Image (cartoon, grey):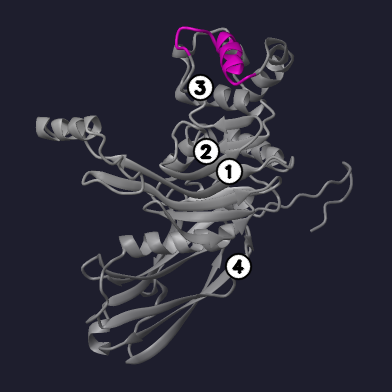
């Protein structure tokens, strides 16, 4: 049975050069010539660091594992270990069958060859027979959407065209195991939608899938399980929703490190009405709890919210209590009940809270944050949900009012 097994894997790297000085080099050579003790691979030298630490997971057929984490958390190293580009310092990795690795798929294209020639060259490198490539050639080119340029040297291609052809080629390999990273980051929106739909189909073919991505909405929609990495270690293992929630909260806490102590208005909690996905266009409710410690000084302050797309950081909506006619005139604890209409495309959205000085026009401190997942039951395109309705009737039929 085809599956992925990663068993207590460690991987270390060394900063800088192998030897800082002639003295280091002589010492290393002398140790080797005199038959000294071989260095323990699990021990760190003075310039060594662990990129991956004690990593274990299994992916069975029909499962899709998402791997998320900040830059430098070890995601790229894990991908290279899975694809055999790197060997683990310690531990064991087992993969069987044909591996489809959609990792920088266009990086191996020969710039002076045409798209057609690169399809046959890269297909051969991936293990496909020429006859097999020939049978699938039209399908590969049609999916990529660059048929008019297939006989043009790829050095004339844009980065998006390279990515589209590279993905289309790798996606038609029919692998036993699928490993994917951010190969589609440069693709246009329409192609990304088509490509991820194809990845979803491949994931449902009862093969093990590993996806590494900063596009949290894709992780949420494609993956059955997830791990969150931080400095090479797994800090959370569970459902995509659980790992994404912790990741978004940790990122918000890192960015928003201000201390609220001493402020006239302080935010203590952000409570979501539900953690279940919300349908695009439907209302979404939450509450903010806090306390007023100095009513006189609190008059100029506002409690604000900021909603952003979690995978891009793009601001979607921001508003404060001051613009809504709410002022803090009484000391003591308070609760602010909020209601938003989720008129946005499907995706993961972070909700951040903050205390804002409206007179000085600056943020004083950031409060708790959370995230919501929006699903789109219809499948519209564009940045805004306009809740379209349509009714079909024969011409001549009176229009209902």
Distance between the Cα atoms at labels 2 and 4? 42 Å
For mark 1, give the secondary structure. Answer: strand
In the rendered structure, which disc, 1 or 3, sits on the residue that comes first in sequence? 3
Determine the CA span between mark 1 and mark 3. Answer: 23 Å
Label 3 vs 2, first from the N-terminus: 2
Measure the C-alpha gap from mark 1 to mark 2. Answer: 9 Å
The 10 Å Cα crowd at callout 2, few under 14, some 14 to 19, many 20 or more, is many
Residue 288 in the image, given as x and y percentages of width and height: 44, 78
**Is disc 1 in contact with disc 4, using a CB cutoff of under 8 Å?**
no
Q: Can residue 269 be seen in this view?
A: yes
Between 354 and 120, the one nearer to me in the picture: 120
Residue neighbourhood size for the residue with mark 3, other residues' Cα within 10 Å, grouped as few (<14), some (14–19), many (≥20): many
| Tag 2 residue | 82
Residue 74 position (above or below residue 270): above
* Residue 287 on image: x %, y %: 49, 77
Q: Residue 283 carries which label?
A: 4
Q: Is mark 2 on a helix, strand or loop?
A: helix
Q: Do the residues labelled 1 and 3 touch (CB within 8 Å)?
A: no
Percent of width and height locating residue 370:
47, 67
Please tell me which of labels 1 and 2 falls first in the chain: 2
Element type where label 3 sits in the image: helix
Q: Which of marks 1 and 4 is nearer the N terminus?
A: 1
Image quarter of residue 353: bottom left
Q: Residue at 48% across / 29% down in the picture?
A: 104
Q: Front-most of 174 and 369? A: 174
- The front one of 315 and 127 is 127
> Between disc 4 and disc 3, whose residue precedes?
3
Q: Mark 3 points at which residue?
A: 162
Report which residue position mark 1 lands on. 210
As drawn, 64 above or below 141: below
As measured in the structure, the alpha-carbon distance from the residue carrying label 3 to the one carrying label 2 is 24 Å
Residue segment shown in magenta: 110-127
């Amino acid at each position: 049975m085809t599956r992925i097994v990663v068993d207590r894997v460690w991987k270390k790297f060394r900063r800088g050069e192998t030897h800082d000085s002639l003295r280091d080099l002589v010492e290393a050579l002398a140790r080797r010539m005199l038959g000294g003790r071989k260095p323990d691979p699990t021990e760190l030298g003075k310039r060594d660091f662990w990129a991956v630490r004690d990593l274990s997971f299994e992916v069975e057929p029909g499962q899709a594992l998402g791997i998320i984490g900040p830059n430098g958390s070890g995601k790229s190293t894990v991908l290279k270990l899975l694809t055999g580009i790197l060997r683990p310092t310690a531990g064991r990795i087992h993969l069987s069958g044909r591996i489809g690795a959609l990792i920088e798929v266009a990086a191996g294209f020969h710039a002076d060859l045409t798209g057609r020639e690169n399809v046959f060259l890269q297909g051969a490198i991936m293990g496909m027979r020429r006859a097999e490539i020939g049978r699938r050639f039209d399908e590969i080119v049609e999916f990529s959407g660059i048929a008019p340029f297939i006989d043009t040297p790829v050095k004339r291609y844009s980065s998006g065209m390279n990515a589209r052809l590279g993905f289309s080629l790798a996606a038609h390999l029919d692998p036993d195991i699928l490993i994917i990273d951010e190969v589609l980051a440069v693709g246009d929106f329409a192609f990304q939608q088509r490509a991820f739909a194809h990845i979803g189909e491949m994931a449902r073919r009862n093969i093990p899938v590993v996806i590494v991505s900063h596009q949290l909405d894709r992780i949420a929609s494609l993956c059955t399980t997830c791990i969150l990495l931080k400095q090479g270690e797994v800090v959370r293992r569970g459902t995509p929703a659980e790992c994404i929630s912790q990741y978004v909260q940790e990122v918000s806490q890192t960015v928003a490190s201000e201390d609220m102590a001493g402020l006239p208005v302080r935010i203590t909690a952000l409570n979501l009405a539900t953690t279940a996905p919300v349908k695009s266009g439907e209302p979404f409710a939450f509450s903010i709890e806090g306390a007023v410690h100095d009513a006189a000084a609190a008059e100029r302050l506002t409690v604000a919210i900021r909603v952003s797309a979690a995978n891009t950081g793009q601001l979607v909506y921001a508003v404060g209590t001051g613009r809504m006619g709410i002022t803090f005139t009484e000391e003591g604890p308070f609760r602010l009940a909020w209601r938003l209409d989720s008129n946005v495309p499907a995706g993961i959205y972070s909700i951040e809270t903050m205390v804002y000085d409206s007179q000085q026009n600056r943020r004083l401190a950031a409060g708790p944050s959370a995230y919501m997942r929006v699903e789109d039951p219809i499948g519209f395109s564009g940045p805004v949900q306009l809740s379209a309705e349509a009714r079909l009737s024969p011409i001549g039929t009176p229009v209902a009012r």
